[in-house]
Image: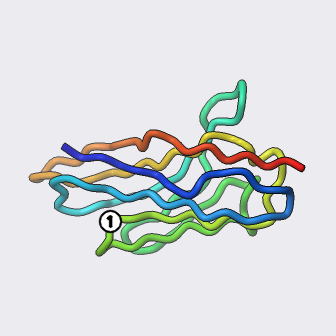
Amino acid sequence: QVTLVESGGGFVQPGGSLRLSCAASGTISSINTMAWYRQPPGKQREFVATIGNGGTTAYAEAVRGRFTISRDNAKKTANLQMNSLKPEDTAVYYCHFYINRGGFQMDYWGQGTQVTVSS
């Protein structure tokens, strides 16, 4: 069994910063792509950022230059540093990993963490 646990969400004023983390646990051979998605209130889930196992990153246009994704393979963790936060960044943030287990790749989602940006 594999579990992804997110942490770091909360309430912040516009212009502030938050750092999200997502840690994987369970029987894991290796982790390929790690990504963050978000679901704003009343909207569909959308892509935020991704990082490959070689460190290549990609970002949604709405967050590029403000958010930074990183990974720690030894700790099986992905991080999302969010700076210059805006009210439109308010959403539930989910991590998503592609994980190798016993020769098979499967994808997993975290439970989500709430980020609220408001004055």
Please state the horizontal and vertical placement of residue 113, each as a whole percent of the image.
Answer: 55, 45
Residue lying at the far right in this picture: please name it.
119
* Number of marks drawn: 1
Q: For mark 1, what is the residue?
A: 76
- Quarter of the image where one finds residue 73: bottom left
Please state the horizontal and vertical placement of residue 60, each as a whole percent of the image.
Answer: 67, 53
Please state the horizontal and vertical placement of residue 41, each as a whole percent of the image.
Answer: 71, 30
Task: Tell me if residue 95 comes above or below residue 66 in the rendering.
Answer: above
Please state the horizontal and vertical placement of residue 57, each as a whole percent of the image.
Answer: 54, 67
The one nearer the camera, 37 or 113, is 113
Q: As drawn, is 20 to the left or to the right of 104?
A: right
Residue lying at the far top in this picture: please name it.
42
Residue sitting at x 75%, y 69% = 65
- Quarter of the image where one finds residue 40: top right
Residue sitting at x 72%, y 24% = 42
Q: Secondary structure at mark 1?
A: loop
Q: How is the image coloured?
A: rainbow
The one nearer the camera, 117 or 73, is 117
